[in-house]
Image: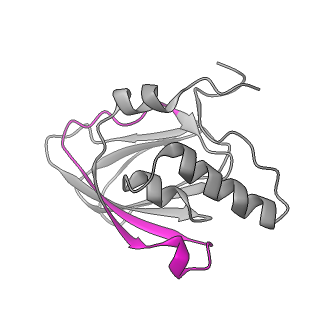
Amino acid sequence: MRPVLSLSTLERAMTRPAVEVLLRGEESGGRLALVEMAVEAGFSGPPLHTHQLWDEGFYVLEGEVTIRSGDKVVTATPGVFAFAPREVPHTFANLGQKDARILVVLTPAGFERYLAGEEDRRLATARVAEWAHRHAIAARSDLKEGGEGEG
């Protein structure tokens, strides 16, 4: 299966929301990262995509965020948690007229560095591949646009 979305395509498709990393992989033994994101009103979100190495959870702190995980779409308000397991197509957006804040939970850690703009995709992927190798997990291409099949 080939990746069908390059990083440059993804970056053009979305403007990165303001991000603050609350818990880094280095602080959790690589198990977990927590990232707070400010999501501006009207933010259309990233293209529908999957992660093969990360589970991603979204907890709404403020505002309203539409989250799609697989076939399930939820308009989440403060206190609502939505889960996007690895290999399940997902996306999120703020379709409302008010800004929102979300807490993003990533497991294992690693992708938080990319979300925060601290390192480029190649380096973030290399760090995850190193983690995967240490834990005897086959490292695979992480980001694919679309749902099932090769799109």
Q: Residue 5 location in percent, x, y?
A: 55, 26
Q: Nearer the viewer, residue 125 or 142?
A: 125
Identity of the residue furthest to the top in this view: 151
Quadrant (top left/top right/bottom left/bottom right) for the C terminus: top right
| Quarter holding residue 51 | top right
Q: Residue 132 location in percent, x, y?
A: 75, 59
Rendered view: 148 above or below 23: above
| Quarter holding residue 50 | top right
Q: Residue 89 location in percent, x, y?
A: 59, 37
Is 37 inside the magenta-drawn segment? yes
Rendered view: 74 above or below 133: above
Q: Residue 134 location in percent, x, y?
A: 79, 66
**Residue 142 shows in the view:** yes
Rendered view: 75 above or below 89: below
Is 88 inside the magenta-drawn segment? no
Q: Nearer the viewer, residue 8 or 1?
A: 8
Q: What are the residue bounds of the magenta stretch?
A: 20-48
Q: Is residue 56 left or right of residue 22?
A: right
Q: Is residue 126 left or right of residue 101?
A: right
- Residue at the image position 61 percent from the left and 72 percent from the top: 30
Q: Is residue 62 left or right of residue 70?
A: left
- Residue at the image position 64 percent from the left and 52 percent from the top: 126
Q: Nearer the viewer, residue 107 or 123?
A: 123
**Residue 82 shows in the view:** no
- Residue at the image position 44 percent from the left and 28 percent from the top: 8
